[in-house]
Amino acid sequence: MSGWKTASAATEWEIDAGTLVVLPTANVQAVERESRTYPEGRDLNRQFERGKPPKTQLAHDIWYTIVRHDPDVLVDLHSSMGFQADDDGYVGQNIFHSQRGTMGPDAEEATAYLNENYVPESRKPRYAFVTTTMSKNLAMIADKARADLGIPTAIFEVTEADLPVETRAAWTEAYTRWIFHHWGLKELQKTGSV
């Protein structure tokens, strides 16, 4: 919920430069059901294999919207059930980044900003954000855009583990505002720690 809530809010933000394209609720039926999967138990997030056409009609439409707009950078907002450090398949509190452009250093700066300004000391080190370089085929849109379009990309992941949706949304918004500022779209305004 934090990703689509932040993306929806971002459609109302005034930007200072450039062009912003936001797809806040691409999978409307899943959003309405507050579900990760729909229809037919499909995870839209896994329909984008590198070098292949997207697997569903909705994924195809999203992909070709991106191709048509020819972005300079793509950021995908997500949440995870747990933590990467637990080695249980979950990846929360992470900024995955491509090696294109400055995305690695960008992710490091963003994690430092989030950890310093948003993650309270009482939640550290468990809830501190980390960075990870995208390497394997994730079948996710940011990975496909990185590989097939050659653009800088990032996947922002916040954990759902013991965090209220308001906190997850605040941290997701803080990252989004930071990346907008970093790419010259908007002046940075802190949203406050939660």
Image (tube, rainbow, N blue to C red):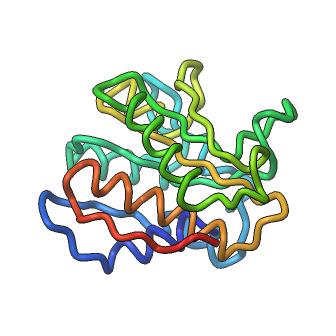
Q: Is residue 177 shown above or below 51?
A: below
Q: Residue furthest top?
A: 135
For the image, the number of numbered tags is 0
Q: Position of residue 31 (x, y in %)?
A: 62, 72
Q: Position of residue 91 (x, y in %)?
A: 71, 40
Where, by quadrant of the figure, is residue 85 drawn?
A: top right
Q: Position of residue 146 (x, y in %)?
A: 38, 29
Q: Nearer the viewer, residue 144 or 130?
A: 130
Residue in the image at 44% along x and 31% along y: 144
Residue in the image at 42% along x and 70% along y: 190
Q: Which image quarter is the N terminus in?
A: bottom right
Q: Is residue 118 shown above or below 143?
A: below
Q: Is residue 121 shown above or below 151?
A: below
Residue in the image at 28% along x and 26% along y: 101
Apparent side of residue 15 relative to residue 25 in the rendered image (left or right): left
Q: Nearer the viewer, residue 181 or 149?
A: 181
Q: Nearer the viewer, residue 119 or 121?
A: 121
Q: Which image quarter is the C terminus in?
A: bottom right
Apparent side of residue 140 relative to residue 13 in the rendered image (left or right): right
Residue in the image at 23% along x and 64% along y: 186
Q: Residue furthest front?
A: 121
Q: Residue furthest left?
A: 17
Q: Position of residue 179 (x, y in %)?
A: 36, 52
Where, by quadrant of the figure, is residue 187 drawn?
A: bottom left
